[in-house]
Amino acid sequence: MKKSSGFIKSFWQGEWSLVQTFWGYGVVGNIVLGIPVIYWEDSFKSLSDGVNMLFSIYNVFYFVFFVWVLVGIWRSATNYAKKKKLWGGLAKIYVFLNVLNLVAQIFVIN
């Protein structure tokens, strides 16, 4: 497979290792970037309109990041499953469950 140029595109194409995509961005990245979202959800009623607008913009950024990571994990897992089906398959189950959770949060919970 020819490597894509650029960080964003190569990640999106699944050219990174499954360890990097899953643990580095899927777990650690989502925890770190998810902290402000959790804070905002807990305190948005007490924040000013300006601060809530900034958090809303951040939420859009986080959503795009989250989708980018899930696509990267899925594609990396597809490549990895050619060697080790178990870990690639488990990573895909993780992505599937995250997509179900995201759909539930958007359409059911709210």
Image (cartoon, helix red, strand yellow):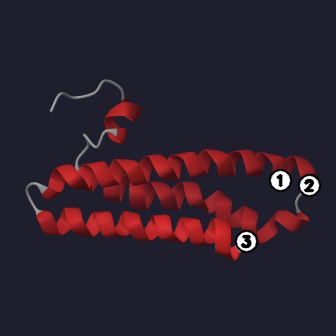
> What secondary structure is found at the residue carrying circle 3?
loop
Question: What residue did someone put label 1 on?
Answer: 52
**Precedes in sequence: disc 3 or disc 2:** 2
The type of residue carrying mark 2 is Ser
Assess whether mark 3 and mark 1 are in contact (beta carbons under 8 angstroms). no
29 vs 97, nearest the viewer: 97
Residue 103, compared with residue 63, is above or below; it is below
Assess whether mark 2 and mark 1 are in contact (beta carbons under 8 angstroms). yes
Image coords of residue 4 (percent x, y)? 28, 27
The type of residue carrying mark 3 is Asn
Which image quadrant for residue 86? Answer: bottom left
Left or right of 48, for residue 16: left
Which image quadrant for residue 105? Answer: bottom right
The residue located at (37%, 32%) in the rendering is 9
Image coords of residue 93 (percent x, y)? 32, 69
Extreme residue toward the left, this view: 83
Question: What residue did someone put label 2 on?
Answer: 48
Quadrant including the C terminus: bottom right
The type of residue carrying mark 1 is Asn
Residue 66, compared with residue 31, is above or below; it is above
The residue located at (24%, 55%) in the rendering is 77
Left or right of 30, for residue 76: left
Q: Residues within 10 Å of mark 1 (few under 14, many from 20)?
A: some
Question: What residue did someone put label 3 on?
Answer: 110
Mark pair 1, 3: CA separation: 18 Å
